[in-house]
Structure formats: structure tokens, C-alpha cells
Amino acid sequence: MRGFIAIVIGYLVFGISNYVFLMMQGIHPADAPAFRLIVITILFGCLTAIVSGILTAVIAGKNYIRYGYILALLIAVIAAISMIMQTGNHWTQWLAILLLAPLALTGTVLYSKLLAWINQPKA
């Protein structure tokens, strides 16, 4: 149950923060915005993907890498479904599938590296 909650919270942090960011910037996901806004969106998306991966790992406790894979898959699948259902430009969905989903998994891996560094024997 804890793993399920971790995935849900991780995805909500990722999804809601990116949605709110796009709306605050006045960007509709199906529109082609200016290059500057695309770069800012990519940077913000990368940050939220990594944070959501770390958050998922922290909440999940044990087997957190497994839940990181599930979070990444969930991000990619929801983006693919959105791409199928939506007309227009699909740049945000491609961004989620090709970059942000893998970065969510990277967040869980970073968490494991951080734990290993913290728990290493002191000399």
C-alpha cells in the first residue's frame, strides 16, 4: 500500500506542478509556444520529474527503485494516452515520454546514491 501511495503522490507532484506551470505561463499543451517558453518548460519539467522520483523513493521506503520504474512508466503512458486523445502539437507529450519519464527514474536512482553516501562507513 505504501508503494501505491508513493506512486500516486509522486505522479500528482509531477503532473499538477507541470500543469499549473503551463497554465501560469499561458501555454496550452497543444500550442507551439515561443522557443524561450519551451526551454523554460523543459527546465521546470526536468526539475519536477527528478523531485517526483526522489519523493516517490522516500515515501515508498523499501523497493523504491521498482516504484521509480512504475512512476516513469505511468508518466510515459499517460503522456501517450494524452497524445492519442489530443489534436494539435504534441511537444509536451513527447517531452514527457522521452525526457521527463526517464528523469523521474533518475530521481529514484539519485536517492539510492544519496542513501549509499550517507550510510557509508566513517573512517
Image (cartoon, helix red, strand yellow):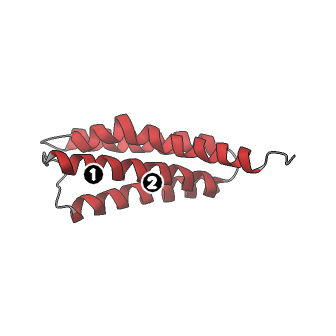
Query: Can the viewer see residue 1?
Result: no
Viewer-side residue, 2 vs 61: 61
Secondary structure at numbered mark 1: helix
Q: Which residue is drawn at 29% across and 61% down?
A: 21
- Which callout, 2 or 1, points at the residue further toward the start of the chain? 2
Question: Is residue 36 left or right of 13 when viewed as pictured?
Answer: left
Question: Is residue 107 left or right of 63 when viewed as pictured?
Answer: left
- Packing grade of label 1 (10 A; few <14, some 14-19, many >=20) is few
Viewer-side residue, 46 vs 52: 46
| Quarter in which the N terminus is drawn | bottom right
Whole-percent x and y of residue 102? 45, 37
Extreme front residue here? 123
Q: Residue at x 46, y 41 (%)?
A: 103
Extreme top residue here? 98
- The residues bearing labels 2 and 1 have C-alpha atoms spaced at a distance of 20 Å
Question: Is residue 11 left or right of 23 when viewed as pictured?
Answer: right
Residue beneath disc 1? 40
Whole-percent x and y of residue 110? 59, 44
Q: Are marks 2 and 1 in contact (CB under 8 Å)?
A: no
Residue beneath disc 2? 11
Amino acid under disc 1:
Ile
